[in-house]
Amino acid sequence: MVFGIVVVNVLLAQTSFRLASAELRLEELSQEHLELVSEQASLSAPGRIAAWASRHGMRLPDDIRILHAPGGRQADPAGTDSLIVGANGSRGRSSP
Amino acid sequence: MSRPPARRLLALFAVMVFAFAAISVRLVVLQVGQASELQDRAFDQRVRTTELPAQRGQILDRDGARLALSTPAADVYADPQLVLDPWAAATKLAPLLHVDAASLAGSMSQDGSFVYLARQVSRAVAERIGELTLPGVGLLDTSRRSYPAGTVASQVLGFVGTDGVGLTGLELGYQDILAGAPGERTNELGLSGQAIVGGIDVEHPPVAGSSVVTTIDRDLQFQVQAALANAVRSQHARGGTVIVMDPRTSQVLSMASYPWFDPNAFGDSPSGTYRNRAITDAFEPGSTNKVITAAAAIQEHAIPLGLQLEVPWTMPVGDYVIHDSDPHGVMRMTLGDIVAESSNVGAVKVADRLGSAGLATYLTRFGLGHATGIGFPGESNGIMLPLDQWSDTSLATMAYGQGIAATPLQMASVYATLANGGRWVQPSLVRGTIDPQGDFVPASRRQTRRVVSAATAHMVTRMLAYAVEFGTGINAQIPGYQVAGKTGTARIPLPDGSGYLEGQYIASFIGYLPAGDPKVVVTAILDRPAAGYGGLAAAPLFRRVALAAITRLGVAPAERVSLPPHALPVG
């Protein structure tokens, strides 16, 4: 009877230590996960990617060109502001 | 062997009796009289309750990209009374903490039993410090708020202090939601600090904070800030503000004011950069306000759309003379021409037909003079005098946007209303929250109200498209897209209210596209740019931001709207 109680207590103690160890490991892994999430967020930040691209000679386009499917309307090509403004200067004032 | 004297035995007996009696009395005192108190003291010594901090929620962009999150960290402290050799400890700690060794040694040599050596160091650094096993130096678990995208949307996000409480921005506004609730753990510990098996072990787990999902598009925000910084530098401006909104929902896709700051190191920037000026600061909007005058006149049938008014370049109003930006002879202009050419005199003539009460009604309906209720700390109401306090010149000046002040957000909301067919939708910065279980909880429904009819909004859109195609907004044109927008060049009031700064302006351009089916509203404002005028300084910034927005959001061109009735030649 006494021996049985002692054995049960020992087993309980061992389980308790294993549980505490597992909880500690879980905590460490949770913290590591958070750090990895933070690192992933930093690596995917647009500023970092833009800086990397810039170092490799890339840059954002100065303008974009809109292409239409056949049968659609013909778009003004990029960089034709002067045509849209008009050459006579009577309109297209860009002041206030 | 002689027997001890009886007197000595008697004395010894007496001493023993006295000792036993004393011990007995003491035992009675301890086990009966002080039993309860001593049991409590013993309980307190072996039972410890520690607070379990709650994980602060994250702040995400509209697609779930993380804009703010908390990571494990540690505070490094010292007990100077236990530090054996301050200089030796400081020499070992200095390279890890990136702090001057002399400063550390000084901290560890001062009076007292507790001093922080560093706050919120990373876990890796904390582990290395722990491995040093320096006497008197310890670590406290904490967390560190980090902003992975750096300056991106910093004024919207705000930041938290070293105690983990939000101090500005959404971090402050959503403090209760982000913070969660701390828990606590109570357990019995042995001398070594190890938990006693089978002893008391009660845990009330912390409740993690919810995450806040914003309406901000992180990548668009980055491009907007790049464009704004470039415009401010090239125009030698004091600063600038850009807002990008979806007119159908009034969700803010991007919002920035230059100069900004890095919330990871907010102490390195002036406190003025923390303000989200798009929401907290009001400015006189200038000619961008003429859309309200035009919309009110159309809605109230105050002027036939084809009517040609005679518009000189100056006009006396009370004791003042108002004038258009450039001298011109008497011109015949329709309401569309007045909007497209941004004529101050024309706007005043239209406002005269509308009347003060009429204009005041529509200024209010469009949301001026009242905070939008976006849910951001410190939102300004703007400044609009009550109608009964208007002076002889108020109607005239408000018709073209002076003598009234609005936040950039309020003005963006005015244009979003027109782009949304005349229905005002309360702007928002937060789509909802994600609770600790991972369930998305949408934000409460936004208020809406009809301001003008869809027909009126469409007519104003035609006038704004006309302004961009042939009027003052030509620098906002985007090939392939029809843009509707309006320039603004507003004088800046002197701080004492005695007049205006000479030759210095707030340049703005606010518009939306595609004009036929608006998907994006862009507000671009520059403070005292070298080019002065909104059409020259702010319209190119609008164009750059609008290009980024339609590219990022995949906005396709739409059917073009026709020009409004006009008297001035086109083409």
Image: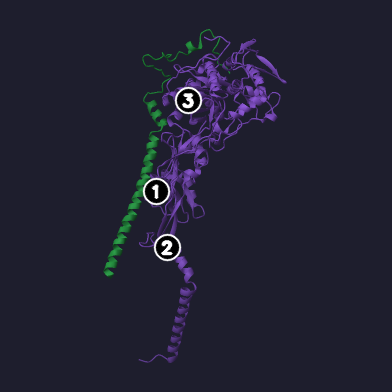
Of the chain colours in the picture, the one used for chain A is: green
The quarter of the displayed image where residue B384 is located: top right
Q: Amino acid at mark 2?
A: Arg
Residue where numbered disc 3 is placed: B520
Q: Residue furthest right?
A: B319
User: Which color mode does the image show?
Assistant: by chain
Percent position of residue B149, x then y: 43, 34
Residue where numbered disc 2 is placed: B46
Q: Earlier in the sequence, mark 3 or mark 2?
A: 2
Of residues A25 and B107, the one nearer the viewer is: A25
Q: Amino acid at mark 1?
A: Ile
> The residue marked by circle 1 belongs to what chain?
B
Q: Is residue B329 above or below residue B551?
A: above
Q: Residue at x 64, y 27 (%)?
A: B360
Percent position of residue B111, x then y: 52, 54
Q: Neighbour class for label 1 at 10 Å: few (<14), some, many (≥20)?
A: some
Q: Is residue B31 above or below residue B530?
A: below
Percent position of residue B466, x then y: 53, 16
